[in-house]
Image: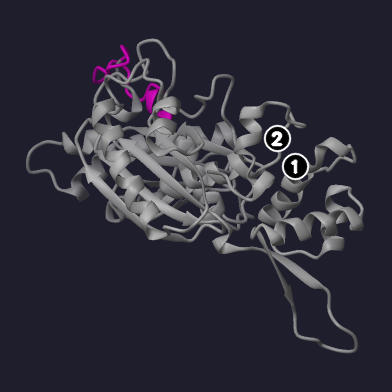
Amino acid sequence: MVLRGTNQEQARPYNRRIVLECIRNDGAATRGDIAERVGLTVQTVSTIVRELEEQGYLLSVREKPKGRGLPPTTLHLNPDGGYVIGISVTPLGVDAALLNLVGDMLGSAARDRPHPTPNDAFGLIAELVAEMRALRPDGRMLGVGFAMPGPFDVQAMSFVGPTTLDGWSGVPVRARLEEVTKLPAFIAVDTVAAAVGVRLYGEGAGLGQFYYLHLGVGLGGTMMQDGMPVRGAWGNAGEIGHIPAVPGGLPCPCGNAGCLERYLSLDSFSKRPKGQSQAEWVEAVTPIFHSAVRTIENLFDPQTIVLGGIASDELIAALVATTDTLPTSISSRYDRTTPRVTASVGHQSVLRGAAALAVSGVLSPRQDLPVTSDRVRKRDPFSNGMAA
């Protein structure tokens, strides 16, 4: 996203977000650097920076002199300038984490609950949010990010079957979440949230174009293009789990047969033949996994495919280890500087990405500013330094 400020007098909240987003995207910078990047005068940027420092969002740091004269101060995000809560709901249960403004995870907790109903899940969310708030009882809570399996609003596919949240169709998730948490809420498909987390804090850091393949109870993915997730017309791009993998294969709850996630997912892994070891399962699904990798590469031409999810680190590593013998695709280049497939381990990408959605949702530039709605003004964290 190209960040540009505006000189309209009523757009001061927008300009504050522009300055903050510039530092979030590009790291510490001087006032002059920011002014040049966003098209505002140094005087305007200095005024905005002073306000953001007073509100606790930014810190000024002067480096040690290396010669004559004082070096300019650089502006950094204040890690304790605000906190966000990331929440993930899967067919296995509910997870939550507290992150600060620069993405440090300050604590996490989980509740196992197979196929939670909405009432079950929101009851657990209330407990988890209370636990996360208690970690920073006096901290400024900006918002909550919520990740859940997709796709959304698709006939015969949404909230149907063992790899989704069966029974959640028609639930007003955002309204329920804001009611329970008393915070602004932001929602995304779990694969999008995880891809954002990988880009900001994981193996995708520094990569503009990569594909994130999410091995969860089901299977999904997201292409990151110029650092942004490709969402599609209705936000459901990346449902790779439902591409045909085996003609006439196993029936899928979506109504088709032979879908990829019937063979490559934690649901498939849990239903493997009795006595089959993890290694034997990996060997059995390797041809299907390699076919999926080749499909992704030929469609998207990514710098790399990052395989992650809620599967164990050992299972993800075992699958990645098979990619030394991948079939040819357009990614079979002599000048590669990254592996065709790499592993993301630690199971935290979804929570980190969900929390990052909340930071962006509350603090990033909004295209519809200047704001006239009283409701939105109340939530503007720059009006009085508080978001909630």
Question: Is residue 246 within the magenta segment?
Answer: yes
- Nearer the observer: mark 2 or 1; the answer is 1
* Front in this rendered view, residue 261 or 112: 112
User: Mark 2 or 1 closer to N-term?
Assistant: 1
Please say if 31 is above or below 295: below
The residues colored magenta run 240-256
Residue 287 located left or right of residue 194: left
Residue 243 located left or right of residue 161: right
Way the structure is coloured: one colour
Q: Quadrant of the N terminus?
A: top right
Q: Secondary structure at mark 2?
A: loop
Residue in the picture at 23% in, 34% down: 267
Q: Quarter-wise, where is residue 51 in the image? A: bottom right
Q: Position of residue 52 (x, y in %)?
A: 71, 56
Residue 170 in sight from this viewpoint = yes
Please say if 349 is above or below 190: below
Q: Quarter-wise, where is residue 219 in the image? A: top left
Could you tell me the amino acid type at mark 2?
A: Arg
Q: Secondary structure at mark 1?
A: helix
Name the residue that disc number 1 marks: 13
Q: Position of residue 131 (x, y in %)?
A: 32, 52
Residue 2 in sight from this viewpoint = no
- Alpha-carbon neighbours of circle 2 within 10 Å: few (<14), some, or many (≥20)? some
Residue in the picture at 31% in, 11% down: 255
Name the residue that disc number 2 marks: 366
